[in-house]
Image: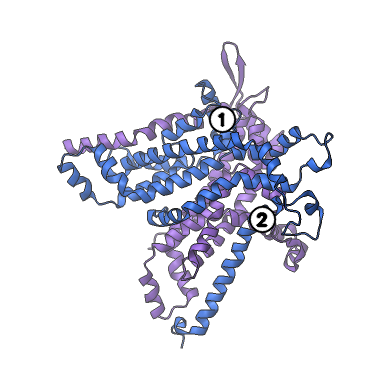
Chain colours: A blue, B purple
Amino acid sequence: MKYNKYLNPKRYINTKILIYIILIGVGYAYLYPMLYMISTSFMSAEDLINPTIRWLPVHPSLRNFRLAFDVLEVTKTFFNSVYLSLVPSILQTLSTAIIAYGLARFEFPLKKLFFVLVLLTFLIPTQTTLVTKYMLFSRLKIAGTPLASFLPTLFGQGIKSTIFILLYYNFFSMLPRALDEAAEIDGATQMQIFWKIMLPLSIPAIVTTFIFSLVWYWNETLLSGLLVGNTLKTLPLALRDFVAKYAEMFPSQIGNSTNRLNEGIRMAATLITILPLLITYLFLQRQFIESIEKAGITGE
Amino acid sequence: MKMKTKKAFFGYLFFSPWIIGFIFFTAYPFFYSLYLSFFNVRFKSTGIESTFVGLKHYIYAFRGDVNFPLALTDTLINIILSVPLILIFSLIIAILLNSQIKARAFFRLLYFLPVVIISGPVVSELVSNNAARIVDPGKYFIYKFFTTLPDRISFPFLYMFDNLVLILWFSGVQIIFFLAGLQKINSSVYEAAKIDGANSWIIFWKITLPLIRPFILVNAIYTIMELASFANNSINGVITMHMFDIDKPYSYSSALSWIYFISIAIIIAITYLLLKERRRV
């Protein structure tokens, strides 16, 4: 009696409908903040006060964006953001590949210990080393310069570098040993094997690492805010200080009430901050999702 | 033999950047902050002068500080309550996304969105402008029902309702992890189970869950660390606030961060013991 419900078409369709309802319902919860952000950021001050207007602005205006653009100093902060996320993510993509290659393809003394240490570094909250990192960098006279962010990345200690090392480790471990043995017989050096054979084969891992690294560096505010934030302000950092900066640029006593900070302006600022990532994501989402699946981010 | 030493040499060569980086940028700051937490630092023209104060900072953190105990419990409760919710939710979504559905690409596009845009300032803007509150949970019967229960019982439930959207927003990477894990399960296992008459409920408990178990552990630890390091935690504010205290610069802040580190380590240890694979006898 109980065998195979999957052959029962009615039941099958019901399950499908339930799946779609859940997926769409939860999807709405994801989209809601986005939609709210977009719709609110186009609303004029009157629209925001008017309780009958919920989604569609009656007097749509770009004024919020103009104000937010100026307060965020987008022309400056955007390029800072690009600089402070692109460089470390390229360094991170390269350095973690080299490190993981050493771990995955060679046997050397204390390898197990190092592997455990790599895992353990992930378990230190950023806050624990915040103070002493700052001290170290100010003693090296690089606090406040981008080097404070780039240098650790170059040595495999960047943001969440453990995840990337594991990702590459899995990838390199899967590649057959016969490949480098054949290359060795043909007289290739270890460096040549790595550059010419292994790296080109691990494109999915490279793409995943690069995109994740880029996103995490773009969004990082805790460490970069302390280490380089005073000299090079990124978009998320500008968003963090948005309210204070706005009050400084438009003191509420002077000027009319139309310049008063409202949620429309704040939502416009938020939208501007995430827009570059959104556009990148929409362009790369196919590679992004496929490469994660191919690279098997979690391993065995 | 020569071949073996050569291999070991190249292994170290490739891996050596990590060792150097680990010593300078992880181990040194980590232990130096432990050292600092037992000392008082004073800046003099001749250099830094430190005097040993023992556990003074640690005791003060709990006995004298008004903000710290609150910020600590606040952050820890947030982590303890959010992690299981995020795990359950992301596993459900991953299973649904892994089933045969239309518009799979669209749903994935949507569900991975938070991975890309989530950051401290963005989240705090969304929260402070009520964009993260999709519906007012207070309007619903079930919410009101829980408010009538004693605080201790109702608290986790009310917390869940209040933070529903944030929990969803923190599940992006976890969904990806689970999805990758689910795709490694050979589909013939499911087919065999179906032929033997197992329903989807049994398949979930007897096949999917045991096979996905290692991923649950990895995901749980990842989630704890993600939440622990999140820039919006109230504990961050307290730690950075005390960094440049005139009477005890760096030291007190270091002590606070070590208390925090130990608390997180305990949570991770408990998680590990709960979720690790039990060897079958």
Of labels 2 and 1, the one closer to you = 1
Rendering quarter of residue B142: bottom right
Q: Position of residue B257 (x, y in %)?
A: 59, 35
The reply to whether the C-beta atoms of the residues labelled 2 and 1 are less than 8 Å apart is no
* Left or right: residue A254 compared with residue A113: right
* Amino acid under disc 1: Leu
Which secondary structure, mark 2?
loop
Residue tagged by mark 1? Answer: A227
Q: Chain of mark 1?
A: A
Is B265 on the left or on the right of B64, as rendered?
left
Q: Nearer the viewer, residue A210 or B98?
A: A210
Task: Note whether B40 is above or below B260 in the view shown.
Answer: above
Are there few (<14), some (14-19), or many (20+) residues within 10 Å of tag 2?
A: some
Question: Residue A4 is drawn in which quadrant?
Answer: bottom left
Can I make out residue A300 in this image?
A: no
Across and down, in percent, residue B91 comes to 51, 62
Disc 2 and disc 1 on one polypeptide chain: no
Q: Which residue is outermost to the bottom?
A: A1
Query: Alpha-carbon distance for marks 2 and 1?
Result: 31 Å
Q: Residues within 10 Å of mark 1 (few under 14, many from 20)?
A: many
Q: Quadrant of the C terminus of chain A?
A: bottom left
Q: How many marks?
A: 2
Residue B156: percent from left, percent from top: 67, 58
**Which residue is tagged 2?**
B163
Instruction: Depth check: give the residue in front, B270 or A235.
Output: A235
B22 vs A106: above or below:
above
How far from the left and from the top, in percent, is residue B208? 44, 67
Residue drawn where x is 48% and y is 52% of the image: A283
In the displayed structure, would residue B238 be above or below residue B117? above
Identify the secondary structure beneath mark 1: helix
- Would you identify the image quadrant in which residue B86 lies? bottom right
